Amino acid sequence: MRNFEHVQDVEEWLEPMGYDEFWVKLSPYGVDAEIRANCETSIANGASPDTVLSVIKSLMRIELTKELGLKRRPITPWVQLVE
């Protein structure tokens, strides 16, 4: 399992994953065969695989954020104002 410090860490980790890779890497986080079966049923019924993957990634980002108590990375200004 990976250690995440911020919500953006989860987003950056999920973003490049393809459909099959998603299921392998997320299995330690509770994404099981039942969830995959529901997604595959949606695809079989005409939903776009890319749309299904996008939705399940978003749902897992929300779930991991809640479960791990993650917050957004603090925004640090690149320029400091000096008086």
Image (cartoon, helix red, strand yellow):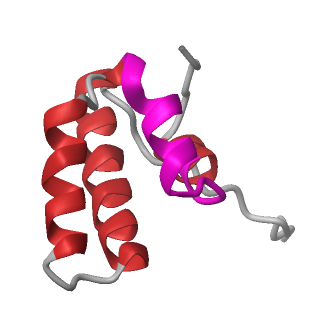
Is residue 16 shown left or right of residue 62? right
Position above or below: 82 against 20: below
Residue that lies at the very extreme toward the front in this rendered image: 44
Q: Is residue 26 magenta?
A: yes
**Is residue 22 among what the camera can see?**
yes
Q: Nearer the viewer, residue 26 or 4?
A: 26
**Residue 2, x across and y down, in percent:** 58, 19
Position above or below: 40 against 29: below
Position above or below: 37 against 16: above
**Residue depicted at 43% across the width and 31% down the height:** 26
Q: Quadrant of the C terminus?
A: bottom right
**Residue depicted at 17% across the width and 42% down the height:** 35
Q: Nearer the viewer, residue 49 or 16?
A: 49
**Residue 9, x across and y down, in percent:** 59, 42
Q: Nearer the viewer, residue 61 or 76?
A: 61
Q: Is residue 18 magenta?
A: yes
**Residue depicted at 73% across the width and 64% down the height:** 77
Q: Which residues are magenta?
A: 14-28
Is residue 24 shown left or right of residue 44? right
Q: Quadrant of residue 63?
A: top left
> Which SS type dominates the magenta stretch?
helix
**Residue 36, x across and y down, in percent:** 25, 45
**Residue depicted at 52% across the width and 37% down the height:** 6
**Is residue 73 among what the camera can see?**
no
Position above or below: 20 against 44: above
**Residue 44, x across and y down, in percent:** 20, 72
